[in-house]
Image (cartoon, rainbow, N blue to C red):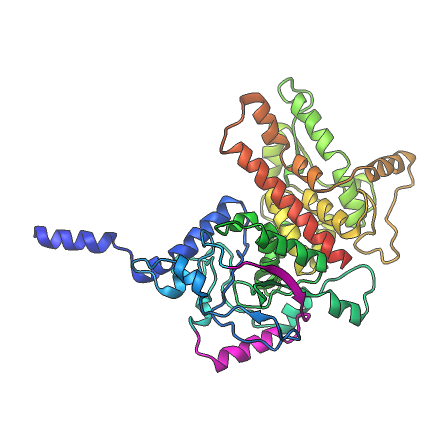
Amino acid sequence: MVRLARAVTKAAVQPPPSASASAPAAAAAAAAAAVGVPRCSMPSTTSATSASTNSNTSSVRPYSSSTPSSLASSSPAKKNVTASAADRRLAGRRRFYKNVGIAPSTPPGHHLQNHHQQQQHQPPVTSVSEVNSPISAGVDGTQSATGVNNTLPTDSSLWETMLHPRRRHHVDSNNEQQSWHTITLDNRALRTPLGLPLSLPSQTLALAVASEWDAQSDYLRPAQMPLMTLCCTAIDQVASQPDSHRTDILRYLANDTSCYWSDPTSARDRVLHRKQMRAWGGLHDTVSSSVLGLPMNSDVNPAFAIGEGEAISLSRRGSSSSSSSGLPHPPILLNKATKWVHSLDAWMLSALYSACAESKSFFIGAALIHEAMNGCAGGGGRGADDESGTTATSTATKKEGRAKKNEAIIRDGKWAVEAARVEEEFNIECWGLVEGGHDYDRLNCSIQMHAASFLARTVANG
């Protein structure tokens, strides 16, 4: 009996081969969660189905599933870990390349079709549902509630449409062909975690991503490559499943952080209220008029909660048109927000998702991405329905003066960090800073906001 109990105990504590094989992926997923990147695919240098590609740049070779000799020597074999699983680990992997560069690439079109054709002519390393990605949705490689999709997109037309930037200015076909670039490591083209070509619609963006790879020292750290993470997320996740990301973005409207204000009449909260005024002043007018194209009047203003009691009451009651809890925003504002989010391509949607997730606010994320897209200060740009490029303005002099004041505010990455961290910074002032916690949160917030703004700006400008 004692021998049997020991055997049962040993079998219970010993992990199954499938779970252990995904331990590197779980470690990468934990690293992604540590930096606060939701739904994001971490970068990968190998692909389960990648092979030679029909690229215009014949001198650039794509990374395949075979492991470089320098990489194989730096990935020691572990018990219950297959060679392919150990090789595709990214977090903690030694730098296996010397030179980083960029090369011209082709726009998304036949990439997905060629990828499926290559998959049919070569023996797959893993099945389609278990692609060679350093981060998986589940420890066993299956889909889970994390929202990360590890299967190849099936609708090539949707994938291609979402990846083509919807720029405000006209770009002819020749310039658009020249604007797509990929990243090269030792003259070999880089691929996404799903094995799709990493084609970026901006030379400036490609140079920035290449600099992230070049900045890696002895070991690769995905947390130090936010732009690479956003680009892989746009290609692998958002372009093939835009509706799920749109839904998640719009959910922030129901309990938007910037719509909950402290009570200015309370002696305890008046200091926090002044800080909120400095950070959020004019934010909702800018988003409502410039981004959504709504008139600046009280009938279509967002719903606000002042003080703890009103916040609890409004969040529980919800709007009359929906049974779910949340702030009762006007239906026209919700419709305009939905239409604007649906007008964004995969690149802007990825940037907006990252900004909203970091700030827990649709209005902060929308203001940041709108300014990055249009290259304007605060209130510039056109509304969601205004094709003539003008914004809806109020005839009242007070409203016009407030709109002009909002235009002077530059809503860039630095502003977004301040707006997203009003309450937390106030608590730090009151109770002190926790080293290893609050300082990391500050750094992560700054990285995510500036990366989202940079991605939107470079893609919009081409």
Q: Residue at x 41, y 55 (%)?
A: 24
Direction top: furthest residue:
267
Relative placement, left or right, of 362 versus 69 is right
Q: How many marks?
A: 0
Q: 217 and 425: which one is in front?
A: 217
Q: Which residues are magenta?
A: 97-124
Q: Residue at x 62, y 34 (%)?
A: 421
Relative placement, left or right, of 186 versus 391 is left
Residue 11 position within the rendered picture, expressed as x and y whole percent measured from the top left: 21, 56
Q: Residue at x 55, y 49 (%)?
A: 37
In the image, residue 265 above or below residue 309:
above
Relative placement, left or right, of 330 versus 446 is right
Q: 445 and 254: which one is in front?
A: 445
Q: Quadrant of residue 386?
A: bottom right
In the image, residue 393 above or below residue 312:
below
Residue 211 position within the rendered picture, expressed as x and y whole percent measured from the top left: 62, 53
Residue 255 position within the rendered picture, expressed as x and y whole percent measured from the top left: 61, 41
In the image, residue 383 above or below residue 64:
above
Is 94 colored magenta in this rendering? Answer: no
Direction left: furthest residue:
1
Q: Residue at x 64, y 46 (%)?
A: 355
Relative placement, left or right, of 135 versus 317 is left
Q: Is residue 252 visible in the rendered structure shown here? A: no
Q: 87 and 359: which one is in front?
A: 87
Q: Is residue 96 visible in the rendered structure shown here? A: yes
Quadrant in the picture for the C terminus: bottom right
